[in-house]
Image (cartoon, helix red, strand yellow):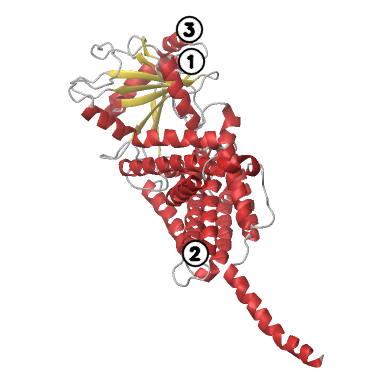
Amino acid sequence: MIRNDIVRVYREVHSWVGILCGLFLFIAFYAGALSMFEESIQRWASPPLKPSHITPIEKTQTLIDRVITEHPSAGRNFNIVLQSSPDRPGRMHWEEREPGADDHALPTHFYADLSTEGELLIRKEQASPVAQLIDTLHQQVGILIDHELAMPITGIVSALYAIALVSGVIILLPTLVKDLFALRLGGKVKRMWLDVHNLLGVFSLPFHIIMALTAVVFALHDPFYGTQMVSIHADKKVPLEGPPAVSPPSENAPFYPVEKLIGKLESSAPEFSPDILNYRQTRGPKPKQMLFVMGKDPKHHASRPRHGLVSLDAYTGEILSTEYMPGQQEVLQATVSSFFALHFGNYGGAITQWLYFFLGLAGAFLFYSGNLLWIEAKRKQNRKKSGFRSDHFLYQLSVGVSLGCIAGISAVVAMAKLAPGAIMNVPAQYNGLYYLLFFVCVVWAFLKRSDAKKNARNLLYFCAAVTALIPLASLLSALGLLGWNHGDHSIWVDLVACVFVTAFCLMALKQRPDAATSTQRANAKQRTESPQALSSTLDS
């Protein structure tokens, strides 16, 4: 049995850690849930490209030579698409960014093919930044600043998140059996919120442990390795890791034929399905051409968010490293990869994808309900206090930030199709639109303290209205009035938006009036009825 004084200490730790990072984590989990369908959102928000003649595999080398001759910069990093799709409508693909932009800046996409007459066809696409914005909100806990500056903040929030998990379990241990399955929906509001909070927290605890630990590593990866290089490996003249050795090419040497490369991979790893061949040059005075084959193995998890990969010699086809190849990894590497695959949810197909989606939404609700519990506890302590009250402030802040995040994301998704010309596909403009809606909701939540619950109800209706623009945009597109409709898996974006609209409206209807407002109404009613009561008393 844990002593009561220890439980009280951990309760304080759990409360304050939750208050400090709860709203950051709400944004991270809500955006993370949506990013499980990043490809569908990207497809929904991007105009279709006209299909073209796909270059036969055996003519890939000719296509590469023609493209690099006319666009030398493409030779630094390009893809050969083995399985074309509406999202990748070309045999050769490469990206270009503005001069000075980092790897996280939105690129311009180019797709190249050879026509039946041998003419080089190149198409340019400026992809919508909507899906990347949602993923950035997830990675950077809602802070849209430079990636290198935001990630340490994410790491700190994730570490506090882990502390909150441990302290929360310790708090619940003394009453685990009694309270775990208790879900008292009637009666006191605080009791109901506490039961829901405990139930979600305990049953999703393994998921949250994985999220917390992996997020710390993702966010602080560069500082960890930078410190390691300076302190432990400072006396070494060579880096810890480097690209696998490749054969030095002769002048204008052709790459290993793609059709033979595919055959070699099939013989060495029959279950591995190659999807993209990524050719990239190493940096240095004597750059070398590297080849990474990206693909999936249905029987094994992927080491990256969307795929696994194997590195080969671009000129001989020799397999150089299977460190990140599904099903071909050593025990230690496979263990580490499986741990990170649990964060990405890139295993188990659509079932896991939907499971992570609901777990992400449940996680967002977990942090929001945690704030409400703290607010309810402080409300009783501050009932007779005048002036600034921490419970009022946190309630308004929680409502404004949470609903501001929801409204902002819904707005940028909808505007990608409603007004693609008014808002160009520039990340800064979409970031500005997100923050505009975000701060409008925050200011709205703080407009009048006595109407806090009314503001929350109106903000929920506002979120429902903004989210309803998403299926409305698709409906108008289907009628030929604007935009585009792909008629494929991206329809899930509209269906989920409709569910969200319904949920926001139901939540708004369930909002109760403020305690202060109820008290004022009760006092007014009492004053109205008091003369009648006095008269009846005198008559008797």
Q: Nearer the viewer, residue 290 or 401?
A: 401
- Dot 3 or dot 2, earlier in sequence: 3
What is the CA distance from the residue labelled 1 to the residue labelled 2?
A: 54 Å
> Residue at 48% across / 24% down in the picture?
338
Using the rendered view, name the quadrant where residue 286 is placed. top left
- Dot 1 or dot 2, earlier in sequence: 1
> Residue at 42% across / 36% down in the picture?
215
Q: Nearer the viewer, mark 1 or mark 3?
A: 1
- Dot 1 or dot 3, earlier in sequence: 3
| Rendering coords of residue 47 (x, y %) | 49, 41
158 left or right of 450 in image: left
| Rendering coords of residue 227 (x, y %) | 25, 32
> Residue at 47% across / 18% down in the picture?
326
10 Å neighbourhood of mark 2: few (<14), some, or many (≥20)? some
What is the CA distance from the residue labelled 1 to the residue labelled 3?
A: 14 Å
Name the residue carrying label 2.
392
Q: Nearer the viewer, residue 259 or 350?
A: 350
> For the N terminus, which image quadrant?
top right
Can you see residue 44?
Answer: no
| Rendering coords of residue 420 (x, y %) | 46, 49
> For the C terminus, which image quadrant?
bottom right
User: What amino acid is labelled 3 in the image?
Assistant: Ser
User: What amino acid is labelled 1 in the image?
Assistant: Gly
Name the residue carrying label 1.
327
Using the rendered view, name the quadrant where residue 532 is placed. bottom right
What is the CA distance from the residue labelled 3 to the residue labelled 2?
A: 66 Å
Residue 267 - label: 3
> Residue at 60% across / 76% down in the picture?
520
User: What amino acid is labelled 2 in the image?
Assistant: His
Is disc 2 placed on a helix, strand or loop? helix
